[in-house]
Amino acid sequence: MKDRIPRVLVLGLGKVGHLVAELLHETGFEVTGADLETGTGFPFANVAVDVSDPDQLNSVLQGCDGVISCLPYWLNIEVARAAVSTSTHYFDLTEDVTTAREIIAMSESSQAAVAPQCGLAPGFVAIAGSFLAAKFSKIRSIKLRVGALPKHPIGLLGYAFNWSPEGVVNEYLNDCEVIENTVRKWVSPMEWLEKIVIDGHQFEAFTTSGGIGTMCDTYEGLVENLDYKSIRYPGHAELMNFFFHELLMREDRDQAGKILVNAKPPVSEDVVYIHVSVEGWAANRLSREEFVRTCTP
């Protein structure tokens, strides 16, 4: 008798959720997508569900082996709670630190896997950093850098809101966890500005919240310096600091997100830059290992 095909529920069928569901479907999983309204043209089953309604949420989880939340971060806690109560494996893509920590705490009493922060950053970038760090007997620094940018930027901001504007606002305004000179601490976002060059193109990178995931938990006491920064086209940080702080848009995050996505709507041609570097000692020699990629659709 053949093994049963795992059943996976994907919550949120925006750009990211649709892609996640389609890739899982192509891989052979039995996928059901769920959003506030049903859609057409999907190669997998999809249903309408309001995740703010506990009865609807628990009902749609029945019979599922796992759930992947591609929803805005503020909806994930209730989804995770429902997954734990139904012993359903839970995964999400959240970058919000407070949300992630609350969900991680739920894992202590869960009979199933609970794994938040499974996106690019946090998520993949930490795997790449850990892979490089494992090559050293003593680690001096781990630097994680990621940017999802328009391939052909227009205007001074050089950006397009291809994913949740609420998430971007969170990254730009919430404090960032780092390890500096062996001391674990929190620093302000949109600071520690640096120049970075990838494939001959110049960018800037600066501190943003959440992308580091739980790396500070893993490497506290093992590394001298550890930080995460977002990659942007030059000049972006100065303009965003002006927008949030001089214009006081930090006091109205919802409105800030609406203004930004209206000014810089999503684009179809984008590019993801990944620059991970680790310095340390191996065989008593100081060296540097890098993982650098440019990813296009």
Image (cartoon, grey):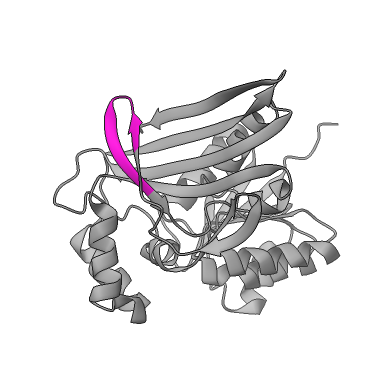
Q: Quadrant of the N terminus?
A: top right
Q: Residue at x 29, y 56 (%)?
A: 237
Give the image location of residue 144, x and y in percent: 51, 42
Give the image location of residue 150, x and y in percent: 26, 43
Vertical comparison of 62 with 55: above or below: above
Give the image location of residue 3, x and y in percent: 81, 35
The reply to whether residue 216 is visible in this rendering is yes
Is residue 201 within the magenta segment? yes
Q: Residue at x 58, y 39 (%)?
A: 142
Q: Is residue 88 left or right of residue 118?
A: right
Q: Residue at x 78, y 61 (%)?
A: 107
Residue 18 or residue 90, whichever sits in front: 90
Is residue 286 within the magenta segment? no
The reply to whether residue 43 is visible in this rendering is no
Q: Quadrant of the C terminus?
A: top left
**Residue 161 sits in which quadrant?**
bottom left
Q: Main secondary structure of the magenta part?
A: strand
Q: Is residue 153 left or right of residue 43?
A: left
Q: Which residues are magenta?
A: 196-205
Give the image location of residue 225, x and y in percent: 59, 45
Q: Residue furthest bottom?
A: 251
Residue 182 or residue 147, whichever sits in front: 182
